[in-house]
Amino acid sequence: MTKIEVNGAILAYDEAGEGSPVVLLHAGIADRRMWRGQVDALAARHRVIALDLRGYGDSELPPAPFAHHDDVVGLLDALGLPRAALVGCSFGGRVAVDTALTHPDRVSALALFGAPVSGYEWSEETEQLWEELVGDVDQEDFTATAAGEVRFWVVGPTRRPEDVDPELIRFAEEMDRRALAAELALSAVEVGELDPPAIDRLGELRVPVLVGVGADDLADIRRLADRIADEAPGGVRMPDIPDAAHLAPLERPEPVNAALLDFLP
């Protein structure tokens, strides 16, 4: 792990390899460790940087306003990188898209897995599913909340917990407990949002965009993947990743790595 000052905050990241730079942006229920199956595989061809977003993992959270997409570019500045490809999963994909729209000259490509985008409104179907699978939990009970969120996101709506590797569930719950503490702290800080949001600006993306989703992820996420690929001029929709839900890069690294190595510049 390396730490670096970015926009007044100390951010943590892992780095490996040489070549064209690739920044990995984790899901909101995780941290940079979710990319453990990608770092070495991509490092054979690329300079790979797996970042803990501000407040998550081992990155700090000073009590000052900030925006995650500005931190991504601040990291590139601090490392002396003119441009990088951004690979994002879930919330990390949202940050990647916002970065590409805000700083288009700093992003060479986007690869998005299970990514929502800013301004997207969840369907009533998803809201009802949340109530069924998670229900009303005490938001300060990180253990119970993490178990519910992992059931919702990592197991997914079409599988049962016993269908999923128990080690994956254990690791995802451990990461999510830390992420929940981060989100609680972030709620007390002014976090900048893209304005106008990305949902109606996908046509402005001027870089190649690879879009993937686990076959067992939410219907909303699969529909949104179709929309991103359709509306982004350089959008490519890869086949759904079998036997995977929302954290497809962690659960099924082999097809994700193959797609990334074929796609990344």
Image (spheres, rainbow, N blue to C red):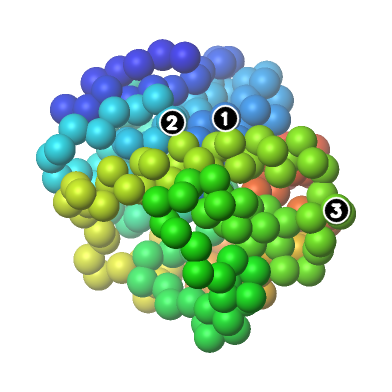
Question: Which residue is at 64% across, 62% downward?
Answer: 152
Q: Which mark is residue 162?
A: 3
Query: Where's residue 252, x and y in %?
Result: 77, 43
196 above or below 112?
below
Disc 3 or disc 1, which is closer to the eye?
3
Name the kind of residue labelled 1 in the image.
Answer: Arg
- Quick check: 223 left or right of 184? right
Question: Which residue is at 29% across, 28% downward?
Answer: 60
Badge 2 or badge 3: first in the primary sequence: 2
Name the kind of residue labelled 3 in the image.
Answer: Glu
Crowd class of label 1 (few under 14; some 14 to 19; many from 20; radius 10 Å)? many
Question: Which residue is at 67% across, 21% downward?
Answer: 40
Q: Which residue is mark 2?
A: 57
- Quick check: 209 left or right of 54? right
Query: Where's residue 259, x and y in %?
Result: 72, 44
Give the alpha-carbon distance from disc 1 to disc 2, as whole Å.
Answer: 9 Å
Q: Are marks 1 and 2 in contact (CB under 8 Å)?
A: yes
Helix, strand or loop for disc 3: helix
Q: Which mark is residue 170?
A: none
Badge 3 or badge 1: first in the primary sequence: 1
Disc 2 or disc 3, which is closer to the eye?
3
